Image (cartoon, rainbow, N blue to C red):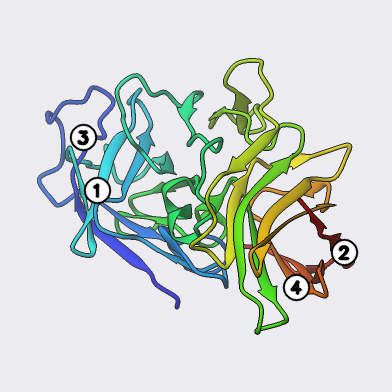
Amino acid sequence: MIREFFLSGLSLFFCACNSESGLPDTDMSVKLLVQIGSNPLSRTVTETDGSVSFYDEDKVGMFVENVENPVLWTYRNNIWKAEKNVEWENRSDDFEFLAYYPCSQTEGVIRTSVPMPDLAVQTGNIDDIGEKDFLVGRCVTSYSANNGVVSFAGENAFTHVFSLLHLNIINEDQSQSFIMESCTFSGEGIVTPYVYSFDSSSSGMIKAGTEEVSELQIDDLSSLSSITVLINPVVMEEPLRFTLRYTVDGKKYEASANLVKNFTAGSFNKLTLRLVDGELSMTGNEVLDWNVIMLEDIVLIGTSM
């Protein structure tokens, strides 16, 4: 479903001196139009088609010129409320707005070092993706360009920074009981911690330290029929290695396979795995730009444990 959020009444003082003096008497409040990606999608609960929606208490941070730290906005009852008043400094000049989601704190956060969610701990449940799905937006505009509206839409729309990987698991023999138990994803840097930099000279993500974290382990899949995880945008020398541990009619199996090497920012890698005669085969594999790119099938051979 396409949703647009027109956010008004946001208050955050946007003056260089952070003062009320010298402001016009007319309404100079900042209003905002939010759109994510090429379609106006929002974010927190992710569906298997890649669409997502904001929920109450979601928080966004926004930087404005001449103010060092971001201002926190909270989504409540279908509107965004800012912790401070935001007003335009004047009607004619262009100003740059930088925004990101999620925002857990604003104190000590600067444009070149925005904390990003930790991907090392994930449940595999698609309903939890919204807690870690990192979005950024940049918009340069003036008050007169759109009557005070800052529009994160079109070419300025919010974009997903991580890559989303969704594995749909199907057991072809419905007479057998099939339970996923655990899985491991292995690949260089797939969940390494980063901070985000809005500095135009940077590539966006900057490592938070020197350590590469190359394995994501999910220990309990028993309640799931599919697995969804977020991965850093990486280009690996070796393909991502996926290992699934599962039970069929009480007997334990393990299957491993190499997937793909490249996970681009904002891509939605959607794979279908089918269990046929004791083998787990990948029969559907596409990348959505959540851009659809068809990939070769991959066969996973299950071995008893």
Instruction: Read off the residue under disc 2.
Output: 299
Give the image location of residue 246, x and y in percent: 66, 58
- Left or right: 275 with respect to 149? right
Q: CA distance from mark 3 to mark 4?
A: 55 Å
Q: Secondary structure at mark 4?
A: strand
Find residue 74 and name its label.
1
Instruction: Read off the residue under disc 3.
Output: 13
Give the image location of residue 117, x and y in percent: 48, 36
Among numbered discs 3 and 2, the one appearing first in the sequence: 3
Look at label 4 and name its amino acid.
Arg
> Which class describes the residues within 10 Å of circle 1: few (<14), some (14-19), or many (20+)?
some
Q: CA distance from mark 3 to mark 1?
A: 17 Å
Figure check: 185 above or below 213:
below
Q: Which callout, 1 or 2, points to the residue nearer the camera?
A: 2
Q: Is residue 54 visible?
A: yes
Find residue 256 and name its label.
none
Nearer to us in this view, 243 or 237: 243
At horizontal 17% and vertical 37% (from top left) the residue drawn is 84
Q: How many marks?
A: 4
Instruction: Read off the residue under disc 4.
Output: 274
Among numbered discs 3 and 1, the one appearing first in the sequence: 3
Look at label 2 and name its amino acid.
Val
Among numbered discs 2 and 4, the one appearing first in the sequence: 4
Q: Secondary structure at mark 2?
A: strand
Q: Which callout, 3 or 4, points to the residue nearer the camera?
A: 4
Nearer to us in this view, 96 or 187: 187
